[in-house]
Image: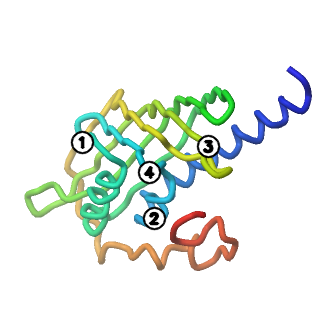
Amino acid sequence: MADEAKVAELIAKEEIRELVCLYSRGVDRKDGALLRSLYTADGVDNHDVTYRGGAEGYVDFLEGAFPYMRYSGHHICNHLIAVDGDRAEGEVYALAYHVIPDGKGGSAEDFMCVRYIDQYRREDGRWLFAQRDVKYDYRSVRPIATPEGEVPKPEDDVSVTELAMRLFARGARA
């Protein structure tokens, strides 16, 4: 592979890694507009037993849950990417931790070891998710003491209030 092709592949991989990090940020910072801008128009998101279908419906599903999620943290571990022109595939290992209502007036921690099996597509110069298939390799939901105080507001998050560059702003990416 010529040096120019290797550099182009490295740039594509870095853009895809940023896409994956923006997805995590979108969920964790409760930013539906950002999430919607990360998928192709025909994008699909299959989250194991939680949700299966179009990406737009998936974001709607998440937005319904956002007000009740006291904490959400997606922590990316390994990420392998194969690029072929304007298509790419990837496998992402991640740890996901959520503090959610337990359905009985209390709280639960929802911890997952997940793998995202991704299909990416470059459209108009941007890498997007064409399909995400999420596998829960391990999941544990157990009761915890309910944290004190209100559910934090996403617009008050320190990364939004303290970091001024566009990468950290709320909202859709163009």
Residue at x 76%, y 33% (from the top left corner) = 9
* SS label for mark 2: loop
**Residue highlighted by disc 3:** 122
Q: Tag 3 or tag 2, which sits nearer the N-term?
A: 2
Q: Which mark is residue 29?
A: 2
* SS label for mark 3: strand
Q: CA distance from mark 1 to mark 2?
A: 20 Å
Q: Tag 2 or tag 1, which sits nearer the N-term?
A: 2
Q: CA distance from mark 4 to mark 1?
A: 21 Å
Which of pointers 1 and 2 indicates the residue nearer the eye? 1
Give the residue type at disc 2: Arg
Q: Which mark is residue 50?
A: 1
Which of pointers 4 and 1 indicates the residue nearer the eye? 4
Give the residue type at disc 3: Arg
Residue at x 44%, y 59% (from the top left corner) = 36
* SS label for mark 1: loop
Mark 4 Cα-neighbour bin, 10 Å: few <14, some 14–19, many ≥20? some
Q: Tag 1 or tag 4, which sits nearer the N-term?
A: 4
